[in-house]
Image (cartoon, rainbow, N blue to C red):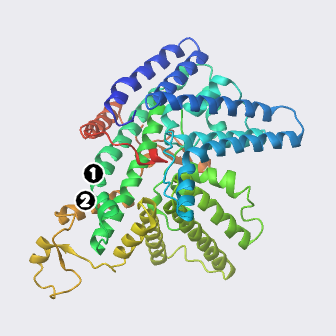
């Protein structure tokens, strides 16, 4: 079941909300149980078979977490933690990487065996990482809430179950433990919830899905795309992925707010970043937090000097790339970002050593932003391409090595072009209405680079509280109720009008 489907928006979500509200009138415990049941139904809608796997994973990790919280000797607790982490990683490894391993071993030894035919359970990467974080927190004695219903909802909570955000135990359990479920469902939460949901739907249905048709001709069919084709396809995917995944995250926040529960912000205008380190503080923020807290820092972080820091950054990003998918393109994407982070930190060290500060220069800031964005786009080409050969062909096209063909209709109008010049006519050009394509990309670019993001529109960043994002002081909530309802309805109806063929979210495959 998808957030952008009629059955979810018109049947499942209203049924879950009214059932939760009715149960919350009598008991928070019952309300949590009702929300857990609906979350399980949401997952079972896709596959009842893999629902059993999810339940087994929850039961196992809950029991391991309870064991880690008990008063045992340090060695016993460490062994329990290692066993728990190993079980989770083996489960994820089997479903996500066994086929990848078999294919590569077969190619290495010359066998014709290609695949085990393993079906990847939806959301397994997200709920596995969520529970790994819980086990580590339990080992550190930072997780102190062990009620089975609450833990089950923490893992299966349907707004985040399939594609995140990746949650921390301490973020959710206090919200589940309120005295009364309805005490958190305020008019402000409902208003913000519908607004986030509407904006997320708009991002997905109106923007991301409209760009999808410009991505496939380059990534899945073009053998040697021209300069124009390659850049249109790569930029279209860059913006499609952003609006698709940030749209999902907005919808998750909005749906959760309807139940009076806050989920963490997952995006903060990452394409406005002026360094690759800043990009990772803004892109998929809960994954970045997980990789930092549960991988990079335990590996030693930057505490043991520049060489160790570089090694830890590369290891973290390689594993982060592999988490996204079982393929050499994901490994290469992770390696690229690891190398860029190493370069970023080396540049920072050299600048600090020689007391060079470019941060206040507009030209340098602009150049830093452009360099960062181009590196991100190059990374997305590798990330999206079906294989490394296809990625290489597209990158060659972006560099102009395959020519810079324009459609014949346009080159006929540009009669001043020298004969045989690089802008040769291309009868098979996949974008016949080049003006419309360029105008759409320009409009999307302006929206990404100049307009405020969802939380900047709907929430407030309180500088007096460490930059904490809160509903207090929100300009949106300061508008008259009727105007808020009108604006939200207009965005929602525009988005819903674009529901035709239901398209899954891009991050569902991870």
Image-based side of 74 in relation to 440, left or right: right
Who is closer to the viewer here, 410 or 467? 410
What kind of element bears circle 2?
Answer: helix
Task: Please identify, in this view, whether the residue under mark 2 or under mark 1 is nearer the observer.
Answer: 1
Give the position of the N terminus as an image quadrant: top left
Who is closer to the viewer here, 458 or 367? 367
Looking at the image, residue 198 lies above or below residue 25: below
The answer to whether the residues at label 2 and label 1 have Cβ atoms under 8 Å apart is yes
Taking the spot 35% from the left edge, 37% from the top edge, the residue there is 4
Taking the spot 42% from the left edge, 72% from the top edge, the residue there is 392
- What x and y, as percent, mark residue 429? 20, 68
The answer to whether residue 458 is seen in the rendering is no
Which numbered marker is on residue 507? none
Which residue position holds label 2?
440
Image-based side of 431 in relation to 110, left or right: left
Taking the spot 25% from the left edge, 59% from the top edge, the residue there is 440
What kind of element bears circle 1?
Answer: helix
Which residue position holds label 1?
210
Who is closer to the viewer here, 501 or 286? 501
Tell me the crowding category of disc 2: few under 14, some 14 to 19, or many 20 or more residues within 10 angstroms, Cα based: some
């Amino acid at each position: 079941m998808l957030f952008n489907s009629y059955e979810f928006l018109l049947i499942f979500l209203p049924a879950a909300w009214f059932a939760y509200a009715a149960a919350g009138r009598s008991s928070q415990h019952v309300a949590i149980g009702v929300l857990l049941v609906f979350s399980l139904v949401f997952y079972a809608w896709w596959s009842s078979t893999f629902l059993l796997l999810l339940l087994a994973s929850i039961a196992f990790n809950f029991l391991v977490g309870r064991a880690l919280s008990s008063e045992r000797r340090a060695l016993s607790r460490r062994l329990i933690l290692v066993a728990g982490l190993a079980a989770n990683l083996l489960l994820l490894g089997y479903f996500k990487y066994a086929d990848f391993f078999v294919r590569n071993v077969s190619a290495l030894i010359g066998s014709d065996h290609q695949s085990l035919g393993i079906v990847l359970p939806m959301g397994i990467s997200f709920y596995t990482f969520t529970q790994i974080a819980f086990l580590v927190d339990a080992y550190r004695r930072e997780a102190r809430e062990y009620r089975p219903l609450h833990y089950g909802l923490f893992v299966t909570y349907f707004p985040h179950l399939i594609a995140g955000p990746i949650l921390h135990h301490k973020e959710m359990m206090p919200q589940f433990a309120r005295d009364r479920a309805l005490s958190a469902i305020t008019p402000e939460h409902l208003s913000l919830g519908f607004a986030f949901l509407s904006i997320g739907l708009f991002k997905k249905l109106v923007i991301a899905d409209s760009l999808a048709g410009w991505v496939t001709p380059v990534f899945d069919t073009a053998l040697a795309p021209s300069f124009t084709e390659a850049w249109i396809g790569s930029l279209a995917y860059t913006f499609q992925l952003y609006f698709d995944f940030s749209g999902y995250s907005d919808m998750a926040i909005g749906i959760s707010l309807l139940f009076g529960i806050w989920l963490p912000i997952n995006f903060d205008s990452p394409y406005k970043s002026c360094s690759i380190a800043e990009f990772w503080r803004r892109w998929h923020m809960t994954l970045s937090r997980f990789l930092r807290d549960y991988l990079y820092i335990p590996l030693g972080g930057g505490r043991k000097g520049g060489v160790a820091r570089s090694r830890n950054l590369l290891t973290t990003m390689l594993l982060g790339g592999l988490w996204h998918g079982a393929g050499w393109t994901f490994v290469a994407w992770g390696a690229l970002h690891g190398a860029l982070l190493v370069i970023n930190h080396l540049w920072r060290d050299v600048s600090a050593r020689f007391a060079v500060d470019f941060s206040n220069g507009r030209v340098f800031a602009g150049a830093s932003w452009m360099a960062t964005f181009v590196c991100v786009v190059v990374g997305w080409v590798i990330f999206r391409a079906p294989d490394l050969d296809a990625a290489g062909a597209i990158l060659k096209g972006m560099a102009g090595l395959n020519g810079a063909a324009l459609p014949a209709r346009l080159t006929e109008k540009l009669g001043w072009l020298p004969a045989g010049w690089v802008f040769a006519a291309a009868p098979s050009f996949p974008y016949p209405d080049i003006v419309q394509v360029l105008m759409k990309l320009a409009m999307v670019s302006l929206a990404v680079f100049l307009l405020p993001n969802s939380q900047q529109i709907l929430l407030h960043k309180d500088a007096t509280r460490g930059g904490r994002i809160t509903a207090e002081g929100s300009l949106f909530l300061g508008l008259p109720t009727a105007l808020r309802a009108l604006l939200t309805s207009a965005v929602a109806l525009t988005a819903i009008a674009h529901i035709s063929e239901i398209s899954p979210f891009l991050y569902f495959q991870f």
